[in-house]
Amino acid sequence: MEPLALQASLVAQAYEAILGEISDGRLPANTRLVQALLAERLGVSRQPVQQALFLLKKDGVVQSAGKRGLIVAPLDLTLIQQHYRVRGALDALAASLAAERCGASAEVAAEVERQASPIVAAGQAAVAAGSITVMVEQDAAFHAMIYAASGNPLIAPTAACHWRYLRRVMAEVLRHAEPPPAIWQQHQAILGAILRGDPIASDEFARQHAEVAAASLARSVAADDAEQGGSDEPPRKRA
């Protein structure tokens, strides 16, 4: 079983490395993805890269482009909004459950606050430093913490497929649309409602947080497409 674990590890590392470059904008939309070149850059054989690209295609991050092979998928606004709606519902459920647990136990509330504090601090520091990669990492960590605090072990794995797609989208939001400090203000509002033991406010704040992110990206995509105007570049997919 050890060789299989090693192979799985290489695939996961290749997946994360490629997704990271796409999220960072180093591999922009419509970029052709050549297995041999990616494998050479990552210092691995083609097999883990091939499997990683297969998984990225399954997650909607890359797509087939006929004779060109695989390319970085253009942003599909309809698909983005669908992902955010599902994630928003899951986030709202997790936040409300976490609030119920905090309201019922001071010990649980203290533990949630203990876990959240360094994440919030790291996220705010990333905003100050302008590090989009760390902002996305801490954003994901914040929501993962709430999933765990909900006490429902099914929420995190259910949300995972949406997070894999939205990590790339979140980087776009952070670069072009939603002011990064506002995102962490929203996080603090969610956290505050959870720690107060207020499931209704927690649900509302978490749902609004996802809706604001989706709306901000929509405005960014619309503005970007308007700027491209008469260029020869293919427009991004719209809702």
Image (spheres, rainbow, N blue to C red):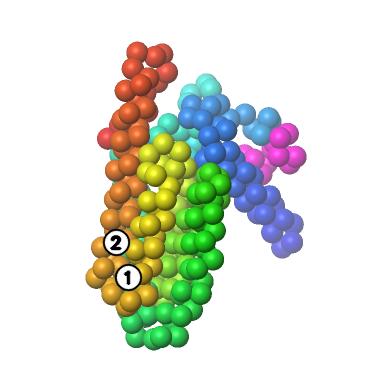
Span highlighted in magenta in the image: 39-53
- Which residue is identified by label 2? 205
> Of helix, strand and loop, which one carries label 1?
helix
Three-letter code for the amino acid on which mark 2 is drawn:
Phe
Q: Earlier in the sequence, mark 2 or mark 1?
A: 1
Question: Magenta segment: does it hold 50?
Answer: yes
Extreme residue in the front direction: 128
Snapshot quadrant of residue 217: top left
The residue labelled by disc 1 is 193
Give coordinates of residue 44: x percent, y percent. Answer: 73, 41
The secondary structure making up most of the magenta span is helix
Measuring from the top left, give residue 124's x and y in whole percent.
Answer: 49, 55
Q: Dot 2, crowdedness within 10 Å: few (<14), some or many (≥20)?
A: many
User: Where's the N terminus, which quadrant?
Assistant: bottom right
Mark 2 secondary-structure assignment: helix
5 is higher (above) or lower (below) than 171: below
* Snapshot quadrant of residue 98: bottom left
- Contact (CB < 8 A) between labels 2 and 1? yes
**Residue in view at x 28 percent, y 73 percent:** 199
Give x and y (percent) for residue 12. Answer: 62, 51
Residue drawn at the location 30% of the way across and 49% of the way down: 212
- Comparing 21 with 204, the one in front is 204
Residue 113 horizontal/vertical position (percent) = 46, 74
User: Could you say which is closer to the camera, residue 126 or residue 68?
Assistant: 126
Q: Is residue 165 above or below residue 160?
A: above
Q: Which quarter of the figure is the C terminus placed in?
A: top left
Q: Is residue 113 above or below residue 9?
A: below
Q: Residues within 10 Å of mark 1 (few under 14, many from 20)?
A: many
Q: Nearer the viewer, residue 216 or 49?
A: 216
In the drawing, what numbered circle is on residue 46?
none
Question: Residue at point 39% right, 52% down?
Answer: 183
Q: Is residue 106 left or right of residue 137?
A: left
